[in-house]
Image (cartoon, helix red, strand yellow):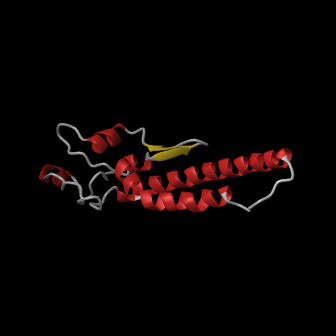
Amino acid sequence: MRDFANMAAFAAFSAGLIVEVDKAKREALEKAAVIVEEEAKRVIGTYDYGWPPLAPSTLAKKSADTPLLETGEMRDSIEHSSNADEARIGSNNDKAVWHELGTSHVPPRSFLMQAAVHKTDEVVKMIGEHVVPKMIKP
């Protein structure tokens, strides 16, 4: 247990701790966003998440059985941003919404939400390893 000579020493220690934890949190959110973004990009063109097979009419137009991957434009549009309080992963490509949620003609093939779900354990572990040591430093 740490002893403090007075309240000023405790306040100085606390202020430094808050700064270190906030910095670690920002860094961890950035790393988490990268992990999920990379996974969302990786899974496009695969059946790794158990998506429904492509329709025969779709396969007839494509050179390969690669769900959500035609030109790579949608995959390449996936980006992330992060700040001190949140991380966002998404796409500004309209097709991303159609595929993520589905339409009346296309079944949903969630790649953004499923990437976050599939990487939850890895992200939680990384955040714990990155932030917790700052919180319990001697």
Q: In the drawing, does residue 58 fall left or right of residue 83? A: left
What residue lies at 29% left-to-right and 51% top-to-bottom?
A: 68
Numbered marks: total: 0
Query: Which residue is more in the foreground, 66 or 129?
Result: 129
What residue lies at 51% left-to-right and 62% top-to-bottom?
A: 125
Tell me where residue 51 sits by quadrant: bottom left
Q: In the drawing, does residue 82 fall left or right of residue 47? A: right
The correct choice, above or below, for 71 with respect to 130 in the image is above
Query: Which residue is more in the foreground, 104 or 125?
Result: 125
Residue 88: image x %, image y %? 49, 43
What residue lies at 37% left-to-right and 54% top-to-bottom?
A: 117
What residue lies at 39% left-to-right and 47% top-to-bottom?
A: 73
Tell me where residue 67 sits by quadrant: bottom left
Q: In the drawing, does residue 49 fall left or right of residue 115? A: left
Residue 115: image x %, image y %? 38, 54
Q: Quadrant of the C terminus?
A: bottom right
Residue 47: image x %, image y %? 26, 60
Q: Quadrant of the N terminus?
A: bottom right
Residue 87: image x %, image y %? 52, 45
